[in-house]
Amino acid sequence: MVLLLLAPTILSLLIFCAHLFRSDGFFLMMPVLLSMPLLLVERGWVARFFQVLLLVVALEWARTAIVLALERDEAGQPWVRAVLILAAVALFALFAGVLFETRTLVRFYPRFYDD
């Protein structure tokens, strides 16, 4: 069950790494990839770390959507579909972060005061 609840986090981070790789962010991609084994550590700080990371990922997707919309609008190209896709990906990242508040993951990653 834990793996099933962590699957959106893993998928969201892998999609984000693909985005970084495509936009020449290799040096930003590597720490994200290398942080993923931390999901196996059963500590409360791990859950908070990934929640913050997923929030940053969602904000980056939102920033990318705005930049893309402005660029496409200026070029006279359609932009709504691209923005909707990026918004969905950002919402998925936020959803993955919220999953850390489920009962199963709270038991797997005990809170700071429970450590």
Image: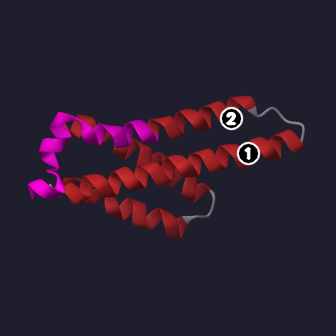
Q: Which mark is residue 82?
A: 2
Give the class, few, some or many, for how many residues have Cα within 10 Å of label 2's Cα (few <14, many ≥20): some
Kindly report the distance in space between the C-alpha atoms of the residues bearing marks 2 and 1.
8 Å
Q: Quadrant of residue 113?
A: bottom left
Q: Quadrant of residue 1?
A: top left
What's the residue at 76%, 34% (across, down)?
79
Q: Which mark is residue 56?
A: none
Q: Is residue 43 visible?
A: no
Q: Quadrant of residue 77?
A: top right
Foreground residue, 97 or 30? Answer: 97
Foreground residue, 27 or 102? Answer: 102
Q: Which mark is residue 68?
A: 1
Q: Amino acid at mark 1?
A: Leu
What's the residue at 52%, 51% (across, down)?
18
Residue 23 location (% of width, % of height): 63, 58
Residue 73 location (% of width, % of height): 84, 39
Residue 25 location (% of width, % of height): 57, 64
Give the class, few, some or many, for how many residues have Cα within 10 Å of label 1's Cα (few <14, many ≥20): some
76 lies above or below 53: above
Foreground residue, 2 or 21? Answer: 2
On whether residue 102 falls in the magenta region, the answer is: yes
* Left or right of 85 in this view: 111: left
Q: Is residue 4 visible?
A: yes
Q: Amino acid at mark 2?
A: Ala
* SS assignment at label 1: helix
70 lies above or below 30: above
Point out the stretch of residues depicted in magenta.
Answer: 93-115
Give the mark nearer the N terminus: 2 vs 1: 1
